[in-house]
Image (cartoon, rainbow, N blue to C red):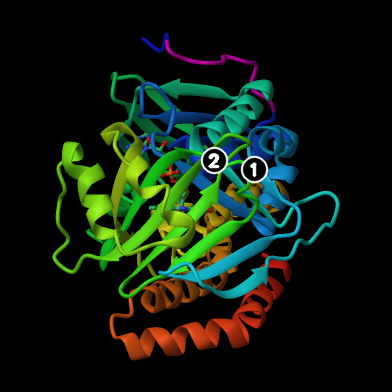
Amino acid sequence: MLCDDIVHAELVGVMKLAIVGGGLGGCALAIAAAQRGISSVIVEKDPGWTPLSSGIFLYANGLDSVRKLGALDDVLANGWSSTDGKNIYYDQNGDVIAETHYPTSMPGVIPPIVGIMRSALHKALAARVKDLGVRVIIGREVTRFHDSGTGPVDFELSDGQSETCDVLVGADGIRSSFRRALFGPIEPEFTGFGTWRSLHEKPKDLNAKIMMMGVGKRLGIMPLSDTMMYIYATTNEPDNPRYPRELMPSIMQEKLKEFGGPATNLLPQIKDPEAVFYTAVEEVALGLPWAKGRVVLIGDAAHASTPYMGQGGAMALEDGLILAEMLAASGANPETLLAFGERRYERCKFVQRVSRSVGDKGGLESAADCQQRNINLRESGQQDVDNFYKRMFAGN
Ligand SMILES: Cc1cc2nc3c(=O)[nH]c(=O)nc-3n(C[C@H](O)[C@H](O)[C@H](O)COP(=O)(O)OP(=O)(O)OC[C@H]3O[C@@H](n4cnc5c(N)ncnc54)[C@H](O)[C@@H]3O)c2cc1C
């Protein structure tokens, strides 16, 4: 029984999408489709439909997508905005290496950087999904689908109900079962790094994003609202360990103990296992195509990236917007879905490549390499930011 449906609204338009996964990509697609008169249903397996975890950073291109989806005011009201885009690099002792500024594509409208709790970003998108009357089935999965190639795509939910749609979308994240069903066992690749995140009260005088560059590790100090911030750290974890949740605070503290300066007062606050998150850093290397018949992948399912550029979520949001735009323009046919992947592939690969290279630099272990990296940051850090965003703003 689909009694958990959040909204049952009259479906608009003749084309119907079934979107499996109500994360950033799935919500973006449902909103952008509804904005174009295309109806959709989201099938989300999490019965609470709320992401756990700490914060997320969105930069100007991701924020422009949020604006197009009609959720910018909500995100700005609930997150921390940097109007000057300042990012200060320190070494592990707390000495400043360099200051860079992130750009915006729409000064005065979109800030260059916003940090926000993941749950608050989700809430803003879910509110738009609801306002637009999109039907959401929570606590269910799609267990089976059949694309005959001629009629609608049939699919079955985990409660046994059957439905049909014109396009079935796998927006089911990095461990996508749709990716496996379409293209076989292409599993996320472990990159040798782990990320640590811990939630803290924001010091009143913290008004910039901070990145501290250590030896074999990095530590970010990232505001999320007027009152909250999180530490985001990366460590080399070549053996891909599994850490017990109750020990995570002490392990995180131990791994980051050499960081001083702005981290000094924060590290002893890492105590609550519920406020500490460890994630093995993985990437999905899927070539083209991203679609088969009338089933297509978007977001992390197709191109999960390492997190160092803060762009994975932004790419998922863009995917949703662009797929909706292409479906509205060219119809629900296999050619549109293949063309979607072709349009997005290079941009998502570019993000993966740049992010991986930033991550590798953060993991350097020899003192000489770290010293050279810091010199490079001082000399060309701003240029690197400008070059990256020139590409991000140049069209998607
Ligand atoms: C440590 C870390 C830090 C990051 N920081 C940033 C950042 O600062 N900025 C940024 O832009 N990106 C960041 N990212 C990347 C970002 O989180 C992802 O790229 C983004 O969440 C991808 O969105 P998505 O919709 O594709 O997948 P997800 O957000 O993972 O959503 C997938 C959804 O599908 C659901 N689902 C899964 N399987 C099924 C199923 N079988 N049936 C139904 N539903 C299913 C899940 O419950 C989930 O709701 C970070 C990633 C990591 C690991």
Residue 155: % across, % down: 37, 32
Picture quarter with the N terminus: top left
Cα separation between marks 1 and 2: 10 Å
Q: Residue 20: which quarter of the image?
A: top left
* Residue at 55 percent of width and 22 percent of height: 135
Q: Against 331, is 155 above or below?
A: above
Q: Which residue is mark 1?
A: 80
Q: Which residue is mark 2?
A: 202
Magenta stretch, residue numbers? 4-12
Q: Is residue 162 left or right of residue 13?
A: left
* Residue at 76 percent of width and 61 percent of height: 104
Of marks 1 and 2, the one in the foreground? 2
User: Is label 2 in a helix, a strand or a loop?
Assistant: loop
Query: Does the residue tagged 2 have its C-beta within 8 Å of any atom of ligand 1?
Result: no
Residue 268: % across, % down: 33, 45
Q: Residue 216: which quarter of the image?
A: bottom left
Q: Are marks 1 and 2 in contact (CB under 8 Å)?
A: yes
Q: Against 329, is 73 above or below?
A: above
**Which amino acid, mark 1?**
Trp
* Residue at 66 percent of width and 78 percent of height: 382
**Which amino acid, mark 2?**
Lys
Picture quarter with the C terminus: bottom right
Q: Main secondary structure of the magenta part?
A: loop
Q: Which residue is most to the right?
A: 108
As for residue 8 lying within the magenta part, the answer is yes
Q: Is residue 329 left or right of residue 317?
A: right
